[in-house]
Image: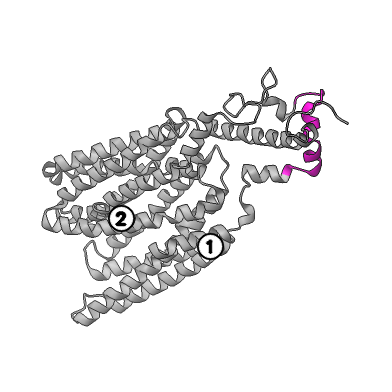
């Protein structure tokens, strides 16, 4: 997935996203079929033949690579096309809808697993695990089928594209005349002060040379760093997560003596609370701001993880206290997804969105790499030590988001209005440029007389 993520994102940005997504559907079918075949090759019991075990391990590595390739399409082109289809100024709401659908559907897996484990046996036996996984492979076919029905033509147009479509030759030729006619105020007039001087999108006056004041221009330049800061923060948090997240089920099994059904119940509850937490975060962001809300939710989530670390000896024997802490921590840490995605897509050009979304595979690679380190530390020390390292690393990644506070406006709608005003300002400046040849003399100054 790491090696192919950026090429897939580039293809989706250069060519039709829907075409690349369709090939992703083919890859999902191939991955599910290959994975199912390997499960039947292994059989119902752990093989006694070491050669067969080694062969199965290599086959699983190969099919995981195939899953990574398929998921690169889902994380890149699919997400980019979704962003293209959401209106600017309301992306947080639409990403909340996406997150809710994703979380509620993720409840189906644990729910089916609970039913199957109750029916086939609530034990960690290879046969039971294989049967549950085969059912999961069948469900992947439904996801693959949906990927053949995407269409780029259904996406919304960006503000610049709408202006190009709405503009006409007559508008360009007569733009200066319409702006100066006395029959009412046009868009250009709205951008002029009472003294007739053109104003920038922030309300500050432009000079007669047309230069934009330095402060808004400087802010706009700094905003180009927003995607990079988000990526670095996400990568750091992912490195911390990889050391711990995959080991929580093993921690529940080995240290807390929970059964398969007990563990599946936890992972059935977690998505529900993630939905509730994401709804709360999205509502809070309307008044507190998106970055401010992200910092608050992640800060509280990290505090809960530190609580688990320092009270782990008591919590191991008190699952009724441990499980709520774990559920609340996981819900809060992941509830900010709609906010982070809306910020990213607001500040990434449309023609680069698939590539930026494909970079998530880099974060996932770091996540997997840190899982290896987490496993080594858990063997040498214990799970509590890895939990502590995770909390420290994730705290560092979260602190990076503080850099976004002066760059991302509190109000998502305000950002949309700023860009609308800036767009009108550019159109006004363009009309002024059309007038310039009629008013300028051969020496570059203002005409003192027309012959």
Q: Position of residue 37 (x, y in %)?
A: 36, 76
**Where 153 sits versus 136, above or below?**
above
- Snapshot colouring: one colour
- Of circles 1 and 2, the one toward us is 1
**Where 170 sits versus 451, above or below?**
below
Q: Is residue 60 left or right of residue 166?
A: left
Q: Which residue is mark 2?
A: 367
The mark that comes first in sequence, 1 or 2, is 1
Q: Which part of the image, by quadrant, shows the N terminus?
A: bottom left
Q: Position of residue 94 (x, y in %)?
A: 51, 43
Name of the residue lying farthest toward the front: 443
Residue drawn at (56%, 45%), measured in percent from left and top?
Answer: 86
Mark 2: secondary structure: helix
Q: Position of residue 335 (x, y in %)?
A: 38, 41
Residue drawn at (32%, 69%), measured in percent from left and top?
Answer: 131
Q: Which part of the image, by quadrant, shows the C terminus?
A: top right
Residue drawn at (22%, 82%), measured in percent from left and top?
Answer: 51
For label 1, count other residues whose C-alpha is less than 10 Å away and answer few (under 14), some (14-19) or many (20+): some
Q: Quadrant of residue 209?
A: top right
Residue 218 in view: yes
| Of residues 311 and 187, the one drawn nearer to the viewer in this rendering | 187
| Of residues 282 and 106, the one drawn nearer to the viewer in this rendering | 282
Mark 1: secondary structure: helix
Q: Position of residue 259 (x, y in %)?
A: 21, 56
Q: Is residue 290 left or right of residue 42?
A: right
Q: Which residue is mark 1?
A: 11
Residue 245 within the magenta-colored segment of the rendering: no
Q: Quadrant of residue 48?
A: bottom left
Q: Is residue 222 left or right of residue 248?
A: right
Segment tinted magenta in the rendering = 166-185
Residue 175 within the magenta-colored segment of the rendering: yes
């Amino acid at each position: 997935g790491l090696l192919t993520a950026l090429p897939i994102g580039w293809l989706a940005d250069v060519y039709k996203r829907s075409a690349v997504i369709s090939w992703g559907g083919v890859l999902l079918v191939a991955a599910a079929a290959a994975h199912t075949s390997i499960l039947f090759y292994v059989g119902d019991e752990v093989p006694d033949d070491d050669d067969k075990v080694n062969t199965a391990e290599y086959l699983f590595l190969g099919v995981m690579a195939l899953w990574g390739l398929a998921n690169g399409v889902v994380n890149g082109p699919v997400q980019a096309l979704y962003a293209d289809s959401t209106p600017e100024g309301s992306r947080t709401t639409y990403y909340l809808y996406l997150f809710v659908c994703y979380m509620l559907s993720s409840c189906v897996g644990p729910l089916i697993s609970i039913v199957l484990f109750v029916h086939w046996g609530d034990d960690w036996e290879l046969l039971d695990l294989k049967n549950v996984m085969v059912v999961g492979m069948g469900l992947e076919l439904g996801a693959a089928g949906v990927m053949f029905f995407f269409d780029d033509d259904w996406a919304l147009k960006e503000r610049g594209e709408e202006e190009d479509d709405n503009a006409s030759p007559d508008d360009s030729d007569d733009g200066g005349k319409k702006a100066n006619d006395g029959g009412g105020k046009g868009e250009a007039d709205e951008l002029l002060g009472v003294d007739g001087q053109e104003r920038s999108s922030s309300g500050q006056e432009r000079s007669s040379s047309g230069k934009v004041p330095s402060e808004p221009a400087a802010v706009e330049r700094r905003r180009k760093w927003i995607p990079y800061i988000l990526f670095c923060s996400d990568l750091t948090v992912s490195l911390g997560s990889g050391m711990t997240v995959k080991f929580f089920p093993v921690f529940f099994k080995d240290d807390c003596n929970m059964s398969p059904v007990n563990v599946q119940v936890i992972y059935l509850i977690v998505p529900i609370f993630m939905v509730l937490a994401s709804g709360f975060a999205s509502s809070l962001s309307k008044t507190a701001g998106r970055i401010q809300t992200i910092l608050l939710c992640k800060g509280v989530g990290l505090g809960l993880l530190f609580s688990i670390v320092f009270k782990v000896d008591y919590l191991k024997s008190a699952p009724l206290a441990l499980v709520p802490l774990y559920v609340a921590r996981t819900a809060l840490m992941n509830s900010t997804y709609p906010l982070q995605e809306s910020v990213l897509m607001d500040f990434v050009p449309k023609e680069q969105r698939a590539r930026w979304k494909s970079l998530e595979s880099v974060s996932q690679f770091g996540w997997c790499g840190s899982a290896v380190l987490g496993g080594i530390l858990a063997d040498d020390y214990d799970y509590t030590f890895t939990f502590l390292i995770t909390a420290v690393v994730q705290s560092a990644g979260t602190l990076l988001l503080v850099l976004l506070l002066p760059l991302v406006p509190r109000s998502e709608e305000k950002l949309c209005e700023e860009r609308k005003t800036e767009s009108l300002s550019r159109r006004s400046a363009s009309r002024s440029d059309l007038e310039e040849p009629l008013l300028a003399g051969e020496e570059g100054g203002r005409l003192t007389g027309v012959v």
